[in-house]
Image (cartoon, rainbow, N blue to C red):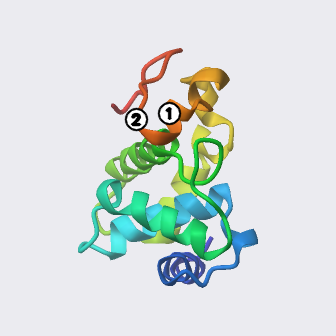
Amino acid sequence: MTDEEMERIATGFCARTLPKEEWTHLAHFATALWLMLQRPDLVPERDMPGMIAAYNESVGGVNSDTAGYHETITQASLRAARAVLAGLQEGVTPGAAFAALMASPMADKDWLFAYWSRERLMSAEARRAWVAPDLKPLPWA
């Protein structure tokens, strides 16, 4: 994904104009990386929960115990994105960071199930608040 495409996705997400069908697993990571690299005024771990919930509502979604914003998935994914960035040279472009992430296990949308059982990760508790992995610890935690 190019720097320009990442910017388009991330700014569309922030402005709540990104079409719902474009808010994919990869778009979540593209947005997180772009915000980490290009928006020092934001702290994704703090700011993205509210941003994602607001975006979901803007496209007709709901944030409930069964749908919408998911705290554990968001925070785990942000930790993964930060870990990828930590392994790259300072000044890396968003596109290069995205390529590095895509070369990792996080490119698979089911990567979290190596750390959490489906039952635990899909629970209402994990959706509302951080729930630690029950299969094995995250390597970057």
Label 1 packing within 10 angstroms: few (<14), some (14-19), many (20+): some
Q: Are marks 1 and 2 in contact (CB under 8 Å)?
A: yes
Element at badge 1? helix
- How many dots with numbers? 2
**Residue 119 percent coordinates (x, y):** 64, 22
As shown in the figure, which amino acid type bears the numbered disc 1? Answer: Ala
**Residue 120 percent coordinates (x, y):** 57, 23
**Residue 79 percent coordinates (x, y):** 39, 43
109 relative to 29 in the view: left or right:
right
**Residue 36 percent coordinates (x, y):** 35, 65
Label 1 belongs to which residue?
Answer: 126
Disc number for residue 130: 2
Q: From what the image shows, is residue 111 above or below residue 27?
A: above
The CA span between labels 1 and 2 is: 6 Å
Question: Which residue of the protein is positioned furthest toward the top in this rendering?
Answer: 135
Front one among 7 and 2: 7
83 relative to 118 in the view: left or right:
left
Q: Residue at x 60, y 24 (%)?
A: 114
In the picture, the quarter occupied by the C terminus is top left
Quarter of the figure with residue 99: bottom right
As shown in the figure, which amino acid type bears the numbered disc 2? Answer: Trp
Question: Which residue of the protein is positioned furthest toward the right in this rendering?
Answer: 21
Front one among 64 and 129: 64
Q: Residue at x 35, y 60 (%)?
A: 44
Quarter of the figure with residue 13: bottom right
